[in-house]
Image: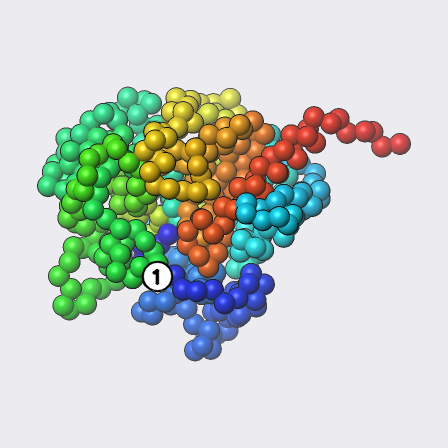
Amino acid sequence: MSSHAGPEQAPALDADASDPVKLGWMEGFPPPQNKLIGQPDSNYFSFPKLRWTVCHFRELLPTKQVSRGLGAPIPLPVAPEDKGIDYVTFTPIGSDTKMTWKDSLAANYTDGILVLHQGEIVYERYFGALREDGKHGAMSMTKSMTGLLAEILVAEGTLDENAKVVTIVPELEGSAFGDATVRQVMDMTTALRYSENYADPNADIWVYSAAASPLPKPADYTGPRGYYEYLQTVQKEGTHGEAFGYKTINTDALGWILARTTNKDVATLLSERLWRKIGAEQDGYMTVDSTGTPFAGGGLSAGLRDLGRIGQLVLNGGELNGEEIFPVEAVENIRSGGDKAAFAKAGYKALEGGSYRGMWWIFHNPHGAFAARGVHGQTIYIDPTAEMVIVRFASHPKAKNAAIDPTSLPAFQALAEYLMAKNATPEQPEE
């Protein structure tokens, strides 16, 4: 999510009625007063405005480029359009009524979706404010990009996962992070006194958001300024390693660890280690705080196909067109999963039996699926058994994926089975 959002509000409109194009947000020269979305208003992330905002963060906040470099893009192979995908059916969790793939897209306020099968695009759709040449907020999928960078450095021997954080970032000695290991930060098993309940206007996440905001602080503001200052104030609660707790500040601590280890910020690392090597067709960008620090926990915006390239690279174990972009051990470590017992304590009903490793969500299902996930419905879902990658951008009115998983997870599984079955049945030659 954007670190500068406000608490979510109750939805009133379905996907069609909340379409930002139909609502006319920011249209006109200038737009009418009642159609403006911008600063210094603080409600640009409230529903339904967020459906426009997720495609336009750089117009609201300062950002840093994630450069693709100057080389030509590497085209993604495109298979003949599979019109049968829209009619794949599944039963949502907790429901007795079947739903089609096509209907699930509107149910989850989808802005863009891409399906790769065996490395080829078999399905691609755009809705609302997103166009094929546009970019969309990745939200907490950014965490998985930061985690992937960390796993790469661990696999290469540049970063010691067992090192105490304080030995890399001495400024965190007095905080909860100081005596945690790098791996505990990577897997979010740190013991932190910190609340990330987006629905609670008094939660710590909003104090963190105020500190991270790049906008001028109120004259009476006395809190920390920027991500790094805030991280130094976080106190310990419990014992590291005992329980999984999904807290964005872990990723920003990891971003600081990566920066200290490589002498490069996360946006630069993402460019050098991934974006410049995958044949990306667009630059990405990351929001930054008032000190220019990229938001490692949720600030990335990118194109749909470029995240498809990332997903395919991960599925391929770090290999692209026969070239090793990063060691396969980085992906193997992620896929091995985290501590299931620690994860179970978080109580994710739709993710029972799952775990969290390197800031990726591991489902431990029969297909070995794992995913990058973000609030309001963002996902890169990788199914190794089906050789399938799904990338979805969305702007669901509810932040938590608990509102989306009952539809999405069975839809993804049904699509995987459909693609596998189709691949197993040779196509008959036309007479």
Up/down of 391 relative to 262, above or below: below
Height in image: 135 above or below 184? below
Residue appearing at x 70%, y 31% in the figure:
422
Residue 163 visible, this angle: yes
The percent position of residue 391, horizontal first and vertical second, equals 52, 42
When the figure is inspected, residue 398 is found, relative to residue 85, above or below; the finding is below
Q: Residue 81: in sight, yes or no?
A: no
Find disc 1 in the rendering and name its residue. Answer: 7
Taking depth in this image into account, of 158 and 142 the one nearest to the observer is 142
Indicate left or right for 347 with 366 as reference.
left
For the C terminus, the image quarter is top right
- Identify the residue shown where x is 29% and y is 62%: 201
Question: On the rendered structure, is 40 left or right of 239?
Answer: right
Instruction: Name the amino acid, label 1.
Output: Pro
Where is residue 293 shown, x and y percent of the image? 25, 48
Which residue appears at 68% of the width and 30% of the height? Answer: 421
